[in-house]
Image: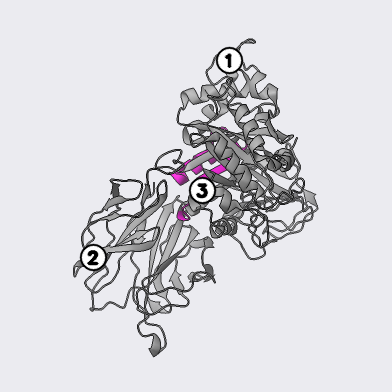
Amino acid sequence: MRFRHRAAAGFATLLLPLAGLVGLASPAQAATAATATFSKTSDWGTGFGGQWTVKNTGTASISSWTVEWDFPSGTSVTSAWDADVTSSGTHWTARNKSYNGTLAPGASVSFGFNGAGSGSPSNCLVNGGSCDGGTTTPGDSAPSAPGTPTASGITDTSVKLSWSAATDDKGVKNYDVLRDGKVVSTVTTTSYTDTGLTAGTDYSYTVQARDTANQTGPVSGAAAVHTTGGTTTPPTTGSKVKLGYFTEWGIYGRNYQVKNLVTSGSAAKITHINYAFGNVTNGQCAIGDAYADYQKTFTADQSVSGVADTWDQPLAGNFNQLRELKAKYPNIKILWSFGGWTWSGGFAQAAANPTAFANSCYNLVEDPRWADVFDGIDIDWEYPNACGLSCDTSGSAAFKNLMSALRAKFGTGNLVTAATTADGSAGGKIDATDYAGASQYVDWYNVMSYDFFGAWAGTGPTAPHSPLTSYSGIPTAGFDTADAMAKFKAQGVPASKLLIGIGFYGRGWTGVTQDAPGGTATGPAAGTYEQGIEDYKVLKTSCPATGTIAGTAYAHCGSNWWSYDTPSTIAGKMSWAKSQGLGGAFFWEFSGDTSDGELVGAINSGLS
């Protein structure tokens, strides 16, 4: 059977105060001014995450903006989002997208990028004027960043924020309090109580100071707040979801056991496991592989506990090993995932009677033999009201109805999640389904932001299978992570309910002579288990990365061309995920990693 997902589709924040006021060209716009501030959001040694914030500090609207800066030799932008970034030598220029160019007085917008090297920007210009000029009084500097806010007294609808004072050579006048990047109040003290919030919701708060000349300094670090109440609670308070798929069939040819999660160190670095897959047939949830799931006995050296299974024990197989894993790591939550590429055909019948389907799933997941093993259910339907292995015509509301029935049956004490397409193209798979309507019933979506391109297109063009952003020459517009996430958010899915997906494998072609993406090929490259696909643990030494494109890596060795994620590109993707307010990350799947779990470690470090 083939179950591989395919979607057709530390470092303290460093703030560099480069803000300045710039008058725009025409006399009619004399009251229009802008500032630009840069922050380094993360650093992984060989690269970093950066963010620029442009703010309209004038009294008239701005219709477009451009930020320019210089990087020292050896430092560059490798991928960017929410702005079009170009370069000429060491000079870089970022221009607004069509959707974020207009700024009302007092409004601000941010764009981010991943960078290579270790340099910092200099010679900043915003809309043609120097970012470090324009003070009201000659020699008057902008204030420093206040301290990161501390949250206290959190209720369903309010939170009290406190921060340490900023400094300024002429004196601080007041502070802007920003919730999710937007100013909600301006206060003269170093505390503020925000009210009117929504129960059970995530918020991010920052603060910036204003001096007596009304100049704003850089924003503080961000404080994450989750209000009490609501229908769901974050699975791990104060942290991002770090979820990995464990495949039931991995114990066979791959010889990857639950115990390997312990020996690799991965179990200590994750929050959730999706056990894949249960079957969907006759409109019901069903066992996928009974022998692997609960019958196979493991020897002492294969067992998490170090004790051999006996032939007559009540529960054996992977389920018992997962139970032993939870005894060692009680913080880990385990979900049983149903469907997958091969077994998604059963969802059409399930959608015809969602209540009956939900009842069957609940009875199976909560079977007394293994009810303590599982903390919820995950649905992997590839794809609702669209084509995958087969085509579904259940309608755009079918997925929402299914998730509603599951939530009603499983209640608020269990997790209910789903894997989704990452097809961000116009009229694509995201558009085919009411994911926004269904999001009220799920804890999160695992957005399968990989397998965008591969050797099913045997002659190419070669392309990275998991691009973070679009790039010049991408074979299909919208087949990238950033466009998919933007489409989900535009549809109305909260960012905190979206997880970025990472593949622990590469996809590749053979017969390739061109190093850069876009080359022609003669077919799929040879793989251990399947043509055109290979585990990261193999590729890292057999075909090391030779370049990066759109936030991911590629490798050209001999006549083979592969694309895959490395610890470095994963660090960049985690930085991007945090900048977008995403709920965390997931990966497919554990056995593709090295024996010491270096990719899991990169996800954990990037989200911590």
Number of marks present in the image shown: 3
Say whether disc 2 or disc 1 marks the residue closer to the N-terminus: 2
Pointer 1 residue: 300
Pointer 3 residue: 497
- Of the pair 283 and 509, the residue shown nearer to us: 283
Residue 67: x and y in percent read: 45, 72
Pointer 2 residue: 174
Q: Residue at x 75, y 54 (%)?
A: 512
Q: Is residue 107 above or below residue 578?
A: below
Assign a secondary structure to mark 3.
helix
Residue kind at label 1, given as amino acid type: Ala
Kindly report the distance in space between the C-alpha atoms of the residues bearing marks 2 and 1.
65 Å
Residue kind at label 3, given as amino acid type: Lys
Assign a secondary structure to mark 2.
strand
Q: Is residue 407 magenta?
A: no
Q: Quadrant of the N terminus?
A: top right
